């Protein structure tokens, strides 16, 4: 389940997520913070990139934000970015509370 960054550092993220019929790979990347991004959903490649140099909690939160970005794109929801921000943050809180109980 752990994804490895370029330095081989294990991360607490899945290798991919499935959204509808799409299998979207999750890739760790250094340098996203230089462009002021924690993560990126690439609609052309249908992949998610997450900054390697962050805490695992922030990586998980960022992943959920990018998943909402992907759903927004694939389902043509036309959500405003503020709604995407809130949904990503709240989904992270929900999933963390579920993991605390298991």
Image (spheres, grey):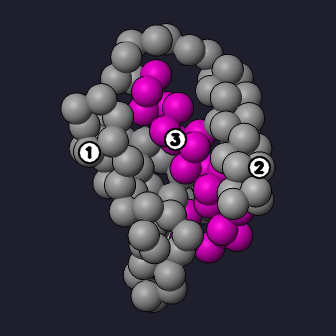
Query: For the point 37% across and 17% down, which residue is it?
Result: 75
| Pointer 1 or 2: first along the chain | 1
Residue 86: % across, % down: 73, 28
Q: Which of the 4 image quarters holds residue 42?
A: top left
Name the residue beneath numbered marker 3: 66
In front of the other: label 2 or label 3? Answer: 2
Give the magenta part as a residue range: 51-72
Q: Nearer the viewer, residue 12 or 6?
A: 12
Q: Which of the 4 image quarters holds residue 45?
A: top left
Q: Residues within 10 Å of mark 1 (few under 14, many from 20)?
A: few
Name the residue beneath numbered marker 1: 23
Q: Is residue 58 visible?
A: no
Residue 67: % across, % down: 49, 39
Residue 6: % across, % down: 41, 81
Q: Residues within 10 Å of mark 2 (few under 14, many from 20)?
A: few
16 to the left or right of 36: left
Determine the secondary structure under disc 2: helix
Q: Is residue 53 visible?
A: yes
**Figure check: 36 above or below 11:** above
Name the residue beneath numbered marker 2: 97
Magenta stretch: dominant secondary structure: helix
Q: Residues within 10 Å of mark 3 (few under 14, many from 20)?
A: many
């Amino acid at each position: 389940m752990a994804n490895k960054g370029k330095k081989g550092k294990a991360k607490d993220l899945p290798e991919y997520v499935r959204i509808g019929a799409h299998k979207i790979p999750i890739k760790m990347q250094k340098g996203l913070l230089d462009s002021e991004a924690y993560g990126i959903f690439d609609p052309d490649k249908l992949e998610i990139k997450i900054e390697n140099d962050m805490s695992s909690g922030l990586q998980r939160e960022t992943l959920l934000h990018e998943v909402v970005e992907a759903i927004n794109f694939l389902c043509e929801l036309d959500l405003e970015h503020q709604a995407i921000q809130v949904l990503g943050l709240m989904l992270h809180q929900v999933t963390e509370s579920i993991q605390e109980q298991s």
